[in-house]
Image: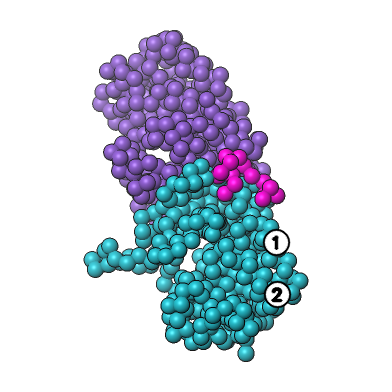
Chain colours: A cyan, B purple
Amino acid sequence: MFKVGILGAGSMGMTHATGWAQTPAHFVGVHALDAERAAAMVAQHGGHTYDSLDALLADVDLIDICTPTHLHHEMVLQAAAAGKHIICEKPLALNAAQGAEMIDACRRAGITLLVAHVVRFFPEYAGAQAIVSRGDIGDVAVIRLTRCSYQPRLAADNWFLDPAKSGGMMLDLMIHDFDYARWIAGEVESVYARSVRGRQPNAPEDYGIAILRHTSGAISNVEGGWAYPPPMFRTALEIAGSAGLIEHPAGSSMPLSLHLKATAGGDVDAVGIPGSPLDESPYTTEIKHFYEVIAHGVTPRVSAEDGLAALRIALAARQSAQTGRAVRIEEV
Amino acid sequence: MRIGILSFAHLHAEAYLGALQTMSDVEVIGLADENVERGRHFAGQFGVRQFADYNALLSERPDAVIITSENARHLPLVRMAADAGAAILCEKPLATTLDDARAIVEVCHAAGVSLMTAFPMRFSTPAVEIKKLIDGGGLGHIYGCNATNQGSLPEFHQSEHLPFLKRDWFTDPLLAGGGAVADHVVHLADLLRWYLASEISEVYAVTNQILHKGKVQVETGGLIMLSFANGTFASIDCSWSKPAYYPTWGGLALELVAEKGLATMDAYRQVMTVYSDRVGRPQYAYWGSDANAGMLRDFIAAVNDKRAPAVSGEDGLRAVEVVLAAYESARTGQPVSLG
């Protein structure tokens, strides 16, 4: 029996618990600061709540770390020391040195570390990657990616808004598309970015655009923001190649449009998560794949090294937005 | 109002002439084109007089001329027209070098003739709605803009495949001043200067030649980031990334993310999709208002009323500065300051 525990009971912890329920793994329980949410998770998915990470680690083969970013480094090292496989939410860490140290510790401990870059499991993003890798649009020339939502609104400890805890919008949100751009067009050489908070750290909300130069010659325009009016969340993707073009504008494939009077001005989720009606949530697809990787040695769609590479692009973008200079990846 | 057209090198000449012919207060005296065969073709198509050369047309003392020669060949025609005392509507980009762009502005100023740069987007009805929204304070401070002015390779534009209609100068680095950047950055650079009432302080650009590789000698992909003095930043995708079989030539669209929310504008969204066996692929049929006609009406009204046109030669010069800074940035890998 393959035993799994979750660390953290925020929106990602809850979402992953739903995913684990769809795998053969046995969910043993959760350790989280918020006892009420932890209790809600085990009420829905079984297992029990644990008082400490050590206690949870003692009971599992794999730990799924869904805590705020600033905790990833210490928790991964602790889990690696305990010899447990690890799934870590993105971003892997707050800086490249920590990320490299985490990867190194897991390698030395002989355990697998995976980073939850879930965008690679969204069917439209995975589908576009498959089209590109089949050669249907030729060599990739220009990529355009958009991911904009409203500012996360957690009732207590809104760590997303604290750059010391989340790394800021570029590390938390835009990193999805930095990873995706790299998946499509390969390594990134340099980044130039502008953002609201880059020059005004105390601005009330953040929005940014980064331009990436890939080693292949491809160029990417990545837009991200926490500045839309809630509950708006838009993603868009476009890939132009030497032999074709993939277009997927924001909102273009929404199968439903509901304008219900009762919901006007209704509840807004604490953190915006994109979604389209599907047989299986992309988060569940991701967890099922990660289970196959760790339990049966399947090659991961996204590796810990990919997670570190995406982090470095995000760090370069943030540095560029702060300094006004284009930043080469090796500088971060 | 008597108007002549100087050169049909730029395909916009056809759109301008077509729009002028719908205006009752305009008399098109004719056209002149250094490519005599091309001039004859369009004179016949539009039913207007073809002059033997530019001097012959200008000796008829037109009130105004439209200059639609290759980007690098605007200045000599501007000099001739200014000497003849004609008001000038000059195709964008105004020039391919700063010296030429400055000379164009100075020559017209010295001759006391009106000069308008052809930026029709300022007269696009969807684009004007956004201007009204901004000026009315509806967006508050604009954080940033994500904009596209993509197109197909210019050689795909011609509808008829007569050899003399091949506008291959669009991909000639000397005559066009470059590729996708020279072709497509200026519209949005100008529109955003107008929207924000702020000057561009810095330009960053990356370009590549992956699209249409081997077919042309200029950049076909480009991403540009403009920084404005008021703090707003704007990215522009000017790539020739629309395939030959795309339902239309390209488009111009932008998103503005602002203090008060999000506004999006797609200047060419007023289309229906047509599936015709005669074409064999979906095509967009545009039914929105004609921005070129709006621009021409302002040009004509400005000449009649002896006022400055809504878009000046200086506006054209500013856009040329942006294009040249973009090329410099693409070379150096770092942003380039303006002014």
Kindly give the residue lying farthest to the right in the view shown.
A108
Q: Do callouts 1 and 2 point to residues on the same chain?
A: yes
Which residue: 54% across, 59% down? A165
Q: Secondary structure at mark 2?
A: helix
Which residue appears farthest toward the left when viewing the image? A261
Distance, label 1 to label 2, CA atoms, is 16 Å
Magenta segment, prevailing SS (helix, strand or loop): helix
Snapshot quadrant of residue B170:
top right
Residue A324 sits inside the magenta stretch? yes
Percent x, y of residue A275: 43, 68
Q: Amino acid at mark 1?
A: Ala
Judging depth in this view, the residue of A136 and A54 nearest the camera is A54
Magenta range is A318-332
Q: How many marks?
A: 2
Q: Position of residue B322 (x, y in %)?
A: 52, 31
Please state if B220 lies on the left or on the right of B22 as rendered: right
Residue holding disc 1 = A100
- Residue B257 image offset from top left, x and y in percent: 41, 47
Q: Indicate the amino acid at tag 2.
A: Ala
Chain letter for mark 1, please. Answer: A
Residue A81: numbered disc: 2
Q: Earlier in the sequence, mark 1 or mark 2?
A: 2
Image quarter hosting the N terminus of chain B: top left
Q: Are marks 1 and 2 in contact (CB under 8 Å)?
A: no
Where is B293 relative to A245, above or below? above
Residue B196's spot in the image, x, y percent?
Answer: 39, 35
**Residue A128 lies in quadrant:** bottom right
For the residues carrying marks 1 and 2, which lies nearer the camera in this image? 2
